Image: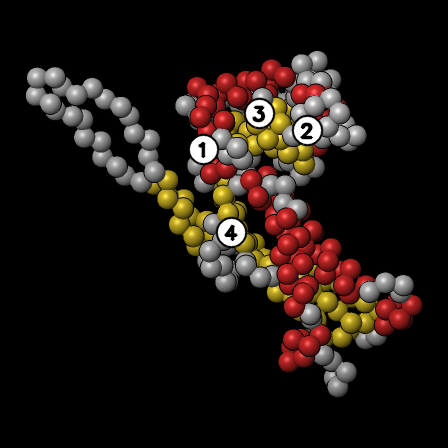
């Protein structure tokens, strides 16, 4: 149709500033994707495969005093392949009359908010990797029949320490508790954690919902923590345990008109993967 807007005009219609805002919204607000291994590289199409090598754990051995003999350890790195298999999009149809009568720039609002929506979806897909099949090296805390409590949190820390990750837990930004947002009410009841513990000082903030860390480990409360069969799969994980690869610049388009409406679209490629088993699940009842 003569009234259709083709791709040849997109450079004029779609301001480059929106591209920057969308990318900023994805990364700056990312509660989860900024706390896992970002291996984006050159993601350009569906089916791209990124190879994620994992170096094996070595042991310390005694040198034979009489001969000076040592123990040769064969290094055989393993790898996981991350496949870019997710193509997500958001499309808005804007009726001409609504556009004329609006008190704000609806198109700008759409693109400004689209980045947040994409980031929330990416967070959800990463957190969906927190399954019993993906994390078996450390014993899961709880059986999913009770609310999350202090014993589960301490137990997860203990499991990671027994797996020789104590030093990693002390490194800023290396480990994170990913907890279901609904656990906030349970965690606030733990007597060991006063507002001073939670906020850093008794008057650190008027926002009593803040939970910066437990036992010095950063904490993220998120509504998209995996829930299956009435069980919340909370997770304590090192950064390298989970990985994400994201298309560097999401596609921003104005699609052909549909009757008396303009259509705007943003779409993005990405993939997620459990990279290495360096996490401990904490199972709690979903209420």
Residue at image point 47% right, 50% down: 39
Judged by depth in the image, the label closer to the viewer, 3 or 1, is 3
Give the spatial CA distance, label 3 vs label 1. 21 Å
Q: 112 or 271: nearer the eye?
A: 112
Residue 216 point in image, percent of width and height? 57, 25
Residue at the spot of label 3: 216
Mark found first going from the N terminus, 1 or 4: 4
Task: Report the residue marked by disc 2.
Answer: 211
Q: How many residues crowd mark 3 within 10 Å: few (<14), some (14–19), many (20+)? A: some
Cα separation between marks 4 and 2 = 28 Å
Any mark on residue 277, and which?
Answer: 1
Reply above or below: 257 against 240.
Answer: below
Question: Marks 1/2: CA distance?
Answer: 25 Å
Q: Residue at x 72, y 61 (%)?
A: 111
Q: Which residue is mark 4?
A: 245
Q: Quadrant of residue 200?
A: top right
């Amino acid at each position: 149709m003569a009234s259709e807007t083709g791709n040849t005009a997109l450079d004029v219609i779609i301001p480059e500033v929106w591209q920057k805002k969308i990318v900023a919204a994805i990364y700056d607000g990312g509660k989860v994707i900024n706390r896992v291994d970002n291996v984006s590289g050159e993601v350009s199409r569906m089916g791209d495969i990124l190879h994620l090598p994992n170096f094996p754990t070595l042991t310390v051995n005694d040198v034979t005093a009489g001969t000076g003999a040592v123990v040769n350890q064969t290094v055989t790195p393993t790898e996981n392949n991350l496949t870019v298999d997710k193509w997500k999009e958001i499309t808005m149809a804007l009726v001409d009359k609504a556009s004329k009568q609006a008190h704000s720039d609806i198109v700008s609002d759409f693109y400004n908010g689209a980045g947040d929506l994409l980031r929330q979806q990416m967070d959800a897909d990463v957190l969906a990797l927190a399954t019993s099949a993906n994390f078996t090296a450390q014993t899961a805390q709880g059986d999913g029949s009770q609310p999350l409590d202090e014993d589960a949190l301490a137990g997860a820390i203990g499991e990671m320490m027994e797996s020789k990750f104590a030093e990693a837990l002390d490194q800023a930004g290396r480990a994170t508790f990913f907890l279901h947002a609904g656990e906030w009410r349970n965690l606030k009841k733990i007597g060991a954690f006063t507002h001073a513990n939670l906020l850093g000082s008794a008057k650190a903030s008027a926002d009593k919902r803040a939970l910066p860390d437990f036992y010095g480990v950063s904490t993220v409360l998120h509504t998209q923590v995996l829930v299956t069969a009435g069980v919340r799969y909370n997770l304590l994980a090192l950064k390298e345990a989970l990985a994400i690869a994201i298309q560097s610049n999401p596609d921003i388009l104005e699609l052909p008109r549909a009757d008396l409406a303009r259509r705007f679209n943003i779409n993005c490629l990405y993939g997620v993967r459990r990279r290495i088993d360096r996490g401990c699940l904490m199972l709690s009842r979903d209420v």
